Image (cartoon, rainbow, N blue to C red):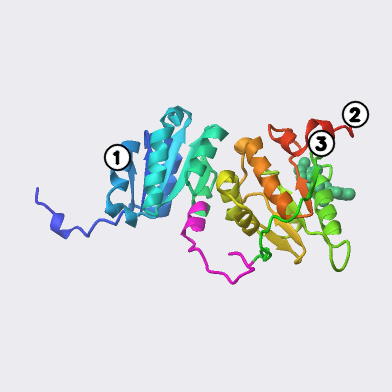
């Protein structure tokens, strides 16, 4: 058999890698990677990924897709090292999560993973995430976000002590979000001049509808705040908001559906503190499900309307 090696074109450069204990357990991911990248991707174990990401060559990767299931939860340290190594090379990280607990998912996002997709992969989900990751960070004039949405321009001074008004429907679909959006707008426009500074926080991470009702885009910056509240400050929190008609400041729900327990009471406490310090009224659209952090927003002693 004669060698045809010299006739072969150069192999396609590797643009991405999956990183997993055994990629065969994620066959839908293999299909999607082939669909997105053809031959231009590789597969690495966690150990090999660490070695590879420590080499300068790995900077040419566009992203790594770390595929994990519940059996990998004991390897959190190693997975965290892979995420950190990728971030150090400015390689984007997408998590492909199969039945991972919200706590573990939260930790991985906190370590710097850029996005996550649940497994089995919903149709087109990997494609959508890659589109977002490949989009260059645009330089927008002050006051506008990447989608052309208007962002708050006032500086975080922490000079307020806002009133928190949570809105919690007693059942699904009873109009709680509609009421919250209207209440926020009425307060923000209560006088033509000198109206209070009002924000609305959509904490229904799963089915949040405030962005839809106010016709606002959903921003990645929200995910960055929720993923790591300890590193957020009033400035980054304000930057993650959008402004509705120049008057109402909106912290939308994230673009992707998130488990409600991705945040803890402590996380929500930090967000409320930042909101209270910078606004006169903080309207909160709550999910209709009671979750661990419901008490942080609505302390038991303040409930009683339904007694
Ligand atoms: N006062 C109202 N009269 C008629 N329809 C309403 C009223 N308020 C809300 N709706 C409609 O009811 C539907 C659900 O409203 P909304 O999203 O505000 O409820 P929700 O309690 O927040 O629901 P979810 O449990 O999904 O968060 C929407 O289609 C909305 O347009
Ligand atoms: Mg609602």
Using the image, tell me which numbered label, if any, was put on residue 48.
Answer: 1
Residue 100 lies, with reference to residue 124, above or below; the image says: above
Q: What range of the chain is rendered magenta?
A: 129-148
Indicate the position of residue 220 as horizontal and vertical percent values. 58, 54
Report helix, strand or loop for mark 2.
loop
For the point 68% across and 60% down, the residue is 242
Asked which quadrant contains residue 22, the reply is top left
Q: In the picture provided, is 212 more to the left or to the right than 64?
A: right
Which of 187 and 131 lies nearest the eye of the viewer? 187
Report helix, strand or loop for mark 1.
helix
Q: Earlier in the sequence, mark 3 or mark 1?
A: 1
Q: Main secondary structure of the magenta part?
A: loop
Q: Is mark 3 within 8 Å of ligand 1?
A: yes
Q: Is residue 75 magenta?
A: no
Q: Are marks 3 and 2 in contact (CB under 8 Å)?
A: no
Indicate the position of residue 42 as horizontal and vertical percent values. 32, 46
Using the image, tell me which numbered label, if any, was put on residue 171.
Answer: 3
Q: Earlier in the sequence, mark 2 or mark 1?
A: 1
Cα–Cα span, label 2 and label 1: 59 Å
Q: Nearer the viewer, mark 3 or mark 1?
A: 1
Q: Is mark 2 within 8 Å of ligand 1?
A: no
Indicate the position of residue 103 as horizontal and vertical percent values. 55, 33
């Amino acid at each position: 058999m004669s060698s045809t090696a010299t006739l072969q074109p150069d192999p396609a450069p590797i643009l991405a890698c999956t990183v997993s204990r055994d990629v065969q357990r994620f066959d839908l991911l293999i299909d999607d990677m082939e669909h997105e990248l053809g031959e231009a991707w590789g597969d690495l174990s966690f150990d090999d990924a660490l070695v590879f990401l420590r080499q300068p060559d790995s900077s040419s990767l566009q992203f790594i897709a770390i595929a994990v299931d519940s059996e990998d939860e004991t390897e959190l340290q190693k997975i965290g090292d892979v995420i950190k190594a990728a971030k150090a090379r400015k390689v984007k990280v997408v998590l492909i999560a199969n039945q991972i607990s919200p706590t573990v998912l939260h930790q991985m996002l906190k370590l710097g993973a850029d996005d996550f997709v649940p497994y089995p992969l919903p149709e087109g989900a990997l494609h959508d995430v890659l589109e977002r990751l490949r989009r260059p960070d645009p330089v927008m004039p002050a006051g506008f976000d990447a989608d052309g949405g208007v962002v708050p321009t006032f500086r975080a001074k922490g000079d307020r002590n806002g009133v928190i008004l949570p809105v919690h429907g007693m059942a699904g679909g009873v109009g709680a979000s509609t009421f919250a959006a209207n209440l926020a707008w009425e307060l923000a426009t209560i006088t033509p001049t000198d109206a209070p500074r009002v924000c609305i926080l959509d904490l229904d991470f799963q089915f949040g509808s405030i962005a839809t009702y106010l016709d606002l885009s959903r921003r990645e910056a929200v995910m960055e705040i929720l993923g790591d509240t300890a590193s957020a400050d009033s400035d980054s929190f304000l930057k993650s908001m959008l402004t509705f008609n120049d008057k109402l400041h909106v912290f939308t729900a994230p673009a992707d559906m998130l488990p409600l327990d991705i945040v803890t009471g402590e996380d929500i406490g930090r967000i409320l503190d930042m909101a209270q310090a910078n606004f006169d009224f903080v309207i909160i659209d709550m999910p209709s499900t009671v979750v661990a952090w419901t008490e942080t927003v609505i302390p038991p002693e303040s409930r009683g309307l339904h007694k």
